[in-house]
Image (spheres, grey):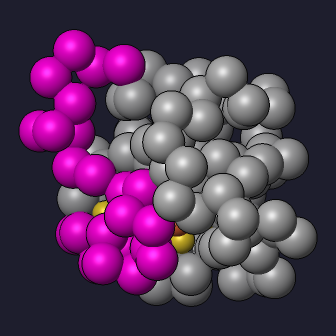
Amino acid sequence: TYVVTDACILCKYTDCVEVCPVDCFYEGENFLAIKPDECIDCGVCEPECPVDAIKPDTEDPDGKWTELNARLSEMWPNITRAKPALPDADNYAEVDGKLDKLSE
Ligand code: SF4
Ligand code: F3S
């Protein structure tokens, strides 16, 4: 599976959802999550994200992001069409370590 990491938080550009062939993105207030059971590992979303938030789970050795994506995608509604990024997206694009700003 691929997973969304904290670079997405407070940005949510949503370019990723337009290309997913199985529509497995789920939307929270300031973050998106991929449902691991539905992701077919095609990888097409990864280069679409302007802030490189999407990673293969091979880059998540301790499973932290996979677990977070699994849990949040169960709680949140599906999103299949792109929409405008969050208002401060460009200001947060370069900020590291945004996990404490995640709205669940
Ligand atoms: Fe969707 Fe493919 Fe990205 Fe998985 S890797 S979330 S199936 S676009
Ligand atoms: Fe987030 Fe990047 Fe998609 S910022 S919404 S993972 S395009």
Asked if residue 90 is positioned above or below residue 39 in the image, the reply reads: below
Q: Which residue is drawn at 59% across and 28% down?
A: 99
Image quadrant assignment for residue 80:
bottom right
- 104 vs 3, left or right, is right
Give the quadrant of ligand 1: bottom left
> Magenta stretch containing residue 72, yes or no?
no
Q: Residue at x 36, y 19 (%)?
A: 64
Provide the residue span drawn in magenta: 42-64
Image quadrant assignment for residue 47:
bottom left
Could you tell me residue 24's position as x and y percent?
53, 58
Could you tell me residue 91's position as x and y percent?
70, 65
Could you tell me residue 23's position as x and y percent?
55, 68
**Considering depth in this image, is 35 or 45 the residue closer to the camera?**
45
- 44 vs 85, left or right, is left
> Magenta stretch containing residue 43, yes or no?
yes
- 22 vs 64, left or right, is right
Residue 47 can be seen in this image: yes
Could you tell me residue 1's position as x and y percent?
27, 46
Asked if residue 86 is positioned above or below residue 39 in the image, the reply reads: below
**Considering depth in this image, is 95 or 41 the residue closer to the camera?**
95
- 98 vs 82, left or right, is left
Q: Residue at x 65, y 47 (%)?
A: 9
